[in-house]
Amino acid sequence: MTQQHQIERELVEKEIRTGPPSMFRVVLLNDDFTPMEFVVAVLQTFFTMDREQATVVMLKVHTEGRGICGVFPKDIAATKVAQVTEHARQHQHPLQCIMEVNE
Ligand code: TYC
């Protein structure tokens, strides 16, 4: 068995033991174009942060490249990603919002 097969087998066995992942992080990615003020408003509108919390997260994304907006069940995380992405495109901003398994 190759090392790759062994890794895949361990992942499948882990999923059988633990069930599918249930919680997902919603993450914002930095870019050079989306205005800071727009990102702060997104965090307040879609992630129920106050202005101070939203500013902290926005500056973290701006300086470190990415930041966590929240952790949610899969369907809620997917809805937030879709809402943020749609809102950003409506305003012609390239803001990227993704979800990933919260191990
Ligand atoms: N880097 C952007 C700027 O300088 C601000 C920004 C922050 C963009 C967070 C995206 O997810 C983001 N205007």
Image (tube, grey):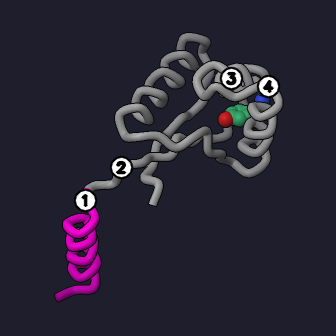
Q: Could you tell me residue 28's position as x and y percent? A: 60, 38
Task: Check if mark 2's residue and mark 1's residue have beta carbons within 8 Å.
Answer: yes
Crowd rating for badge 1 (residues with CA inside 10 Å; few <14, some 14–19, many 20+): few
Task: Check if mark 3's residue and mark 4's residue have beta carbons within 8 Å.
Answer: yes
| Residue corresponding to mark 2 | 22
Q: Earlier in the sequence, mark 1 or mark 4?
A: 1
Cα–Cα span, label 2 and label 1? 8 Å
Q: Quadrant of the C terminus?
A: bottom left
Cα–Cα span, label 2 and label 4? 29 Å
Residue farthest to the left, as pictured: 1
Q: Check residue 44 in the rendering and tell me which mark sits there, or answer none.
A: 3
Q: Using residue 79 as the reference point, say whether residue 51 is left or right of it.
A: right
Tell me the amino acid under the disc marked 1.
Gly
Q: Earlier in the sequence, mark 2 or mark 3?
A: 2
Membership of 77 in magenta stretch: no
- In this picture, which residue range is highlighted in magenta? 1-19
Tell me the amino acid under the disc marked 2.
Ser
Q: Earlier in the sequence, mark 1 or mark 3?
A: 1
Cα–Cα span, label 3 and label 4? 7 Å
Quadrant of residue 15 in the image? bottom left
Q: Is residue 32 something that shows in the picture?
A: no
Q: Is residue 21 something that shows in the picture?
A: yes
Q: Earlier in the sequence, mark 2 or mark 4?
A: 2
Q: Earlier in the sequence, mark 3 or mark 4?
A: 3
Residue farthest to the bottom, as pictured: 1
- Please state which of the two labelled residues, at mark 1 or mark 3, is closer to the viewer: 1
| Residue corresponding to mark 4 | 51
Name the secondary structure under disc 1: loop
Q: Using residue 33 as the reference point, say whether residue 99 is left or right of it.
A: left
